Every structure is written in C-alpha cells, then in structure tokens.
Amino acid sequence: MEIDVRSPTALIIGASRGLGLAIAEEYLRRGWHVTGTVRRAARTALHRVADRSKGRLTVEKVDIVKPAQIAALRRRLAEKRFDLLFVNAGIMNDDTIAEVSTADFTRMMVTNALGPMRVVEAFEDLVKRGGTIGVMSSGLGSISWSDGYLQVYSASKAALNMLMKGFAARHATRTTVIIAPGWVRTDLGGPNAPLSIAQSIPRVVDVITSRTGKRGLLFLNYRGKTVPW
C-alpha cells in the first residue's frame, strides 16, 4: 500500500496495551500514520491492530530500560520524521518507602522516569519543527495534589515531570507536554478507577493536539486543565 506522505505521523512508545494502545488507535482513527512500540517479541493487541490498519500502523520493539535497545530503534528510524513523539510507560508499586526494596525502587525510577527521558533525548531530532513531544505522567506526580498515596509511584512520576521540565528548558522552542490521563480502568489503573479508556483517551489526544505549534511545556490533565507541579 502506498503511504500518503501528507498524513501526520506519530511515534508512540509503549503501545502494546492499555493507554498506549488506545492512544495509537485514536490517532489511527484520526487519519494519522503511527509507529507504535512493544517491549517483547511476542504478538500483542498492537500487532492485531496493525494487521487491520492497511499499512498505517508499524510495530517496532524496544525496552526503554535498556539503552542499547533505544539506540538500536533510533538507528532503525533514522530516516523517518514525526509530528508527534509520545512516551507512554509506567509500572506500579504500592509499597511505601519503608517497605520498598532498593531493587524495586530503582526499577520504578528507571522505567517511569529515566527510560522515558532517554527516549525523549534520543528521538528529539526526529520530531519535525513545530511537532510535539509528550510524556504520560499522572496526577499523582503533582506534589501539590499528592496525599502520600502510592508513594513510590508518585515519586517516579514527579521525577519524570522534573526531568521533562529540564528538557523543555534546554529546548525552549519545542512544543512539549506532560499529560495526566486521570484514573483509568486498565491493568495498571485497576477495576475501581472511575474513568473508562473511552472517557479519557480521546480527550488526551485532543489536549495534545491543542498544543500543536505552541512553544514551552505544560502539565495538563485529560480535560486540558493545568495540573499544579
């Protein structure tokens, strides 16, 4: 199938399931061409979407906690340019600081903060001028909003926010956004979350779209409201 080069393009990191998969599907519905990544070689729901996409979805593999895999993906995509780079990555841990092991704390920080920012740094130059760079955070990453719940997870998302703020300071002409999608019913969010994917993700994409061409960094929720740092 011949690709329409006029269609906008998105690179969605972490799209095998949950919110990342839903974001990839939403961009496809809006006529974009999407490159979505999975962590393992096994077939996922993203592969099934690709089978039905008529060539508009390409699946790539990368584990963002492994720098060598990030570098390999960067080499594979070196000739491509994207209108959007969005990094969706997250693991959950409900231990308190008193309970969490050093290994689990480190894994949380690398997966939720360091890995996503390594991707942002590695792929920034593949995002077109006027394109958008975004990461998936959480309202729990807001120090102002935090009530101490999910302490380690919250700390990892606060770290992601701070690292993204540093990136934005060094790339002041870039359009950058941090998204809090709300508490959504997924494997990560659990069955008691008040929002469905359908209630969150189309709005998330609307919010990302609203940032197109606007310089600077904002921390926004799925309704487009500013989240306090």
Image: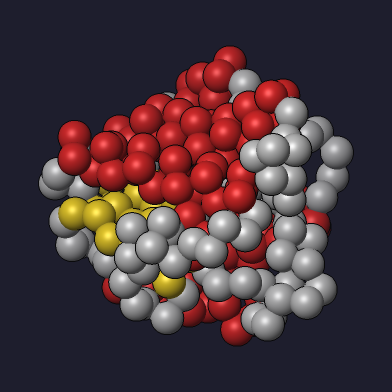
Q: Name the side, left or right, on which 45 lies relative to 137.
A: right
Taking the image as drawn, is residue 182 in sight? yes
Q: Quadrant of the C terminus?
A: bottom left
- Camera-side residue of 60 and 38: 38
Residue at 44% x, 41% y: name it.
159
Q: Outermost residue toward the front?
A: 98
Residue at 48% x, 55% y: name it.
141
Residue at 58% x, 15% y: name it.
68
Residue at 74% x, 29% y: name it.
101
- Camera-side residue of 222 and 36: 222
Specify the quadrant of the image occupied by residue 21. Answer: bottom right
Q: Quadrant of the N terminus?
A: bottom right
> Can you say whether 192 is above or below 154 in the image?
below
> Can you say whether 140 is above or below 100 in the image?
below
Q: Please provide percent x and percent y for residue 125.
A: 30, 33
Q: Please provide percent x and percent y for residue 150.
A: 65, 55
Numbered circles on residues, count: 0
Q: Please provide percent x and percent y for residue 16.
A: 72, 51
Q: Outermost residue toward the right?
A: 42
Q: Name the side, left or right, on which 126 lies relative to 20.
A: left
> Can you say whether 22 is above or below 151 in the image?
below
- Camera-side residue of 18 and 183: 183
Q: Please provide percent x and percent y for residue 122.
A: 40, 28
Taking the image as drawn, is residue 51 in sight? no
- Camera-side residue of 153 and 91: 153
Specify the quadrant of the image occupied by residue 200. Answer: bottom right
Model colouring: secondary structure
> Can you say whether 138 is above or below 133 in the image?
below
